[in-house]
Amino acid sequence: MTRQMILASTLDELRSARLLLDGKLGFVPTMGYLHEGHLSLARRARTECDSVAASIFVNPTQFGPNEDLSKYPRDLDRDLHLLEEVGVDLVWTPTPEIMYPPGFQTWVEVQEMTRSLEGAMRPGHFRGVTTVVAKLFNAVQPQKAYFGQKDAQQAAVIRQMVRDLNFPIEIIVCPTVREPDGLAMSSRNVYLDPDQRKAATVLFRALSAAKAEYEKGERDAEKLRGKMKEVIAREPLAQMQYVSCADYDTLQELDKVTGKTLLSMAVFIGKTRLIDNFVLEAPPVTS
Ligand code: PAF
């Protein structure tokens, strides 16, 4: 028998609905305007858990003052329909007043790991992410939570927060879902006009070029960063913000690639800021 998806908005509604969900609960936090990337997380949760909950909340505290909070795309009816099709049991759509009641002054902050990459470019971003995710975890009380590899640093920061604060939650990081031409799916892709949309494949092309060099034996991290920069520089509509070749666990920039490595970048296509990454698995040990 298929159960009807429950919609909760207030905390009381969420808590009453949570009591109805049996067994292991998988949770997919989102900011809505869902695409195949989000749905792949919900489908994975559906296969691994007894019940699945999702949240839709455009979290104001993770946007900087000059970022796209006010124009962030929203389509709640469509999102709910998509989540229902995947078989999600409960969707929570809290308001900003619920998440940040008047007088709010308690923040969750992961320190070292948020100083580089996205954290360096978007001051305060990860403080907003970890605070809202901690609050979502407290309210929803899942056993497993699902995040996309596309936001690689976010996933690493949340894993660190879960370890540091002893949340009894397993964090599952799922592969990036891509368009046929390689562009990583993102709610922000909707901002791109047709020419920018074509140019946006430059992130995938740059990452692929660096990975090809790695596969040919290149281990000098500066040369891999250089390869990515070279490809981005050839795309007239692209403006690089950073490229990185960093240790997968610590996110520290590398001189030499010896173990599991994260190639990542942020690139502006017009006014739209896109991020993407590839993971280079550790090379096999030869004796
Ligand atoms: O990845 C996102 O969509 C957001 O950062 C998250 C995890 C839902 C927190 O607002």
Image: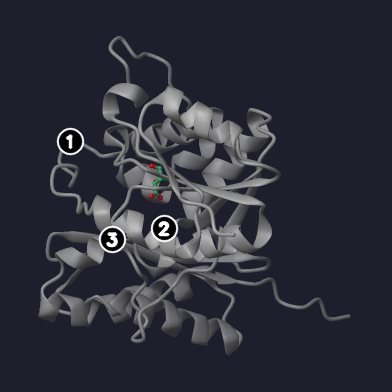
Q: Amino acid at mark 2?
A: Leu
Q: How is the image coloured?
A: one colour
For label 1, being within 8 Å of ligand 1 is answered no
Q: Which mark lies nearer to you, 3 or 1?
A: 3
- Which picture quadrant has residue 119? top left
C-alpha gap between disc 3 and disc 1: 19 Å
Residue found at x 52% / y 50%: 155
Residue found at x 46% / y 35%: 130
Q: Position of residue 30 (x, y in %)?
A: 39, 49
- Which residue lies most toward the top here? 103
Task: Name the residue that disc number 3 marks.
Answer: 187
Where 12 sits versus 271, above or below? Answer: above
The numbered disc on residue 65 is 1
Does residue 226 show up? yes
Please report whichever mark, 3 or 2, sits nearer to the chain's N-terminal start.
Answer: 2
Marks 1 and 2 in Cβ contact (< 8 Å):
no
C-alpha gap between disc 3 and disc 2: 16 Å
The numbered disc on residue 83 is 2
Instruction: Report the side of 41 relative to 23 (left or right).
Output: left
Marks 3 and 1 in Cβ contact (< 8 Å):
no
For label 3, being within 8 Å of ligand 1 is answered yes
Instruction: Report the side of 85 relative to 61 (left or right).
Output: right
